[in-house]
Amino acid sequence: MIKVHQVLATLGYGDAIGHEVLGIQRVLRAAGYQSEIFVETADYRLEPLTRDYRELVDVSDRDNLLLHHFSLGSKASRTAFALPDRMALIYHNITPPEYFVGVHRTLARQCFRGRRELQAYAQRCDLAMGDSEFNRQDLETLGFPRTAVLPVVPDFSHLDRCPNRMVARDFDDDRTNVMFVGRVIANKKIEDVIRFFHAYQTFFNPRSRLLIVGAQSGFERYLASLTQLTASLGAEQVHVVGHVSDEELVAFYDVADLFLCASEHEGFCVPIVEAFYKQVPVLAYAATAVPSTMDGAGVLYGDKDPMHVAALMDAIISNAALQDAIIEDQLAAVDRLRAKDFAGTLLRFVDQILSCPRAPAPRVTFDFWNQFDAAQELEELRLYRPAIYKALPEVS
């Protein structure tokens, strides 16, 4: 029997990729396929649902199909690359490394290498799927000959839980709550969110607060810069909440008056459609995949002047009729998103891959990835420390 397994570096709890991976497994199993999830690491709450990536070697078969969620280069990815199984890539985008050069050099290096390593899969895959048109176009630019869109259909069930009472008690008051949900990471441009909020609080509404909800571990230097910025501006009521439970997240959406996004690089941005679902007006910067994710709903802005954005914030928050119209459009966008036949699209792609001539078998020598890593390190040095190459003899 043909098996369709998933492989990825890590399975996180409560994040967009984690929800999608579990949703794909449900669809595959309902269709009669045996389907496991192979990872290097997983959140302890999800570990029972996964298997160690090294077990891929034991279950490998040239008739099987691996759905490979590529993020950054990993041992799981490299193991999957070398196996004889058919492969389809699911691409969630890799943030350009320049966002992290000053705040997280290790991640900058990983993103640089990840984008380079991704190109090695162009001929390995029978099909490469982006979870948005923006991501599909990125794959095409990177040289993938066979691309498609596997739409993100968010699972909102975690937002139907009872809200955390302590959050509601602490933040459901007469203050206006401006909220951003997402990882505290440099491409999200949370410093811009803080600047916009400070302008709004100073010139339009002193009885307001900012709630920044999302994981922050690993980005202590960036978080420190946000703390310093908040202090230098004299902004008050800025709460960097950190990672929260589903019940706490529901409560934060319930008390929010506006969702404010300034991110400059998104492959999709699930929190935006979560805010749509929770009937919170969204004001977002029109960059990368964000406009297509919003699908004509919410409010987009293209000018990052703090007074301009603050005025937009006030126009939305102070006008109940406008809020109602925005929320109505957002709920219609959610309906359009949920109407997409995610299960049918996925199964059609699986059938298409299994019925077509397979991509050439991977050509992997015993030291392939060692040589690949060495090449990446040399290329990285050439880009970021070009003076080193002045010591080399000139090519005659």
Image: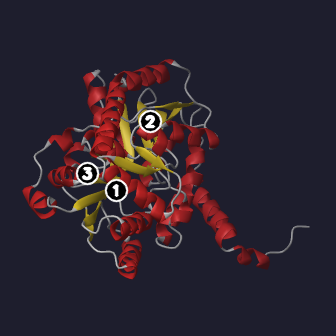
Q: In this view, does 275 lie above or below 194?
A: above
Q: Please name the amino acid that badge 1 sits on.
A: Gly
Disc 1 to disc 2, C-alpha distance: 21 Å
Report x, y in % for residue 50. Answer: 26, 45
Q: Please name the amino acid that badge 3 sits on.
A: Tyr
Query: Mark 2: which secondary structure?
Result: loop
Q: Please name the amino acid that badge 2 sits on.
A: Gly
Rendered image: mark on residue 13: 3
| Foreground label between 2 and 3 | 2
Q: Name the residue under label 2.
A: 296
- Tell me, yes or no, whether the two marked residues, 2 and 3, touch with CB atoms within 8 Å: no
**Residue sitting at 16 percent across and 53 percent down?**
251
Disc 1 to disc 3, C-alpha distance: 14 Å
- Tell me, yes or no, whether the two marked residues, 1 and 3, touch with CB atoms within 8 Å: no
Q: In this view, does 366 lie above or below 28?
A: below
Residue 236: which quarter of the image? bottom left
**Residue sitting at 43 percent across and 35 percent down?**
295
- Numbered marks: total: 3
Report x, y in % for residue 354. Answer: 46, 22
As drawn, which residue projects farthest toward the top? 355
Q: Within 10 angstroms of label 1, few (less than 14), some, or many (20 or more) residues? A: many
Along the horizontal axis of the image, is 357 left or right of 300?
A: right
Quarter placement of the C terminus: bottom right
**Residue sitting at 35 percent across and 34 percent down?**
329
Q: Mark 1 points at which residue?
A: 182
**Residue sitting at 86 percent across and 72 percent down?**
394
Report x, y in % for residue 197. Answer: 36, 65
Along the horizontal axis of the image, is 23 left or right of 372?
A: left
